[in-house]
Amino acid sequence: MLRKIYCWLIIQFMLLKYKNVYFGQNSSICYGFKLVNSNNGSIHIGNNFSTRSYVKLLADGGNIKIGSNVFMNNNCSINCMGNISIGDDCLFGESVKLYDHNHNFADLNKRISEQGFDIGFITIGNNCWFGSNVTVLNNVTIGDNVVIGANSLIYKSVPSNTIVMMRSELIYKNRGLRLGEGN
């Protein structure tokens, strides 16, 4: 009961602090939840949204839309300057990161921090599951019913009804051999 009251108070505080923020019914957030909405961004969260600890939603002029029945595990973050849309019934494992923008870096005569951003979008369909430590980069559409395995880097679109796995083989080398000798 105390947890529900705590969640309700935190959500009410966020609704008062930020404009263009909406939480659906029955949302449940945990300790360390952080929401930042700046530069006329918007955050719209559907019904039955729930998190574990230290989830961060940052809309810096961007628009975040999260559907209903979405769960985010510990340390997930959404960093939005453009548009990020998540469908209904999605599950996010620990430390999933979504970035709809990237730094520009083409001008060698300027520091990267002075070159601005390439702002894009991320669209995620319904009924998707993201394993732990997945990172999704900008300009990606992920269809419905997609499963993305742990430690995957998603930098291009994924069609519906797909399983994505990062397969990286372990490489063993004998430390006594010089490069190029043996296996």
Image (cartoon, grey):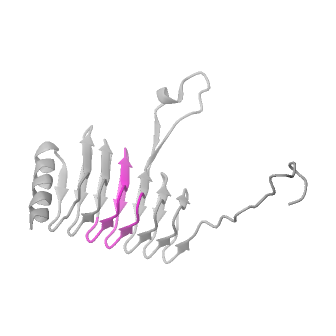
Indicate whether 90 appears above or below 140. Answer: below
Q: Is residue 142 inside the magenta stretch?
A: no
Whether the magenta-drawn stretch holds residue 79 is answered as: yes
Residue 49 image point, x, y percent:
24, 66
Q: Residue at 46% of width from left, 66% of height from top?
A: 142
Front in this rendered view, residue 122 or 26: 26
Q: Quadrant of the N terminus?
A: bottom left
Measured from the top left, where is residue 14 in percent x and y? Answer: 16, 48
The total of numbered circles placed on residues is: 0
84 or 5: nearer the eye? Answer: 5
> What residue do we see at 51% from left, 66% from top?
150
122 left or right of 5? Answer: right
| Residue found 60% across the figure and 65% down from its top | 166
In this view, 1 is above or below 177: below
Image coordinates for residue 54, horizontal then vertical, percent: 31, 53
* Residue 125 screen position, x and y as percent: 39, 69
Q: Identify the residue at the far top of this view.
A: 109
- Toward the right, the furthest residue is 181
The reply, left or right, for residue 168 in relation to residue 180 is: left
Q: Is residue 105 above or below residue 8?
A: above
Q: Quadrant of the C terminus?
A: bottom right
Range drawn in magenta: 67-95
Closer to the camera in the image, 161 or 54: 54
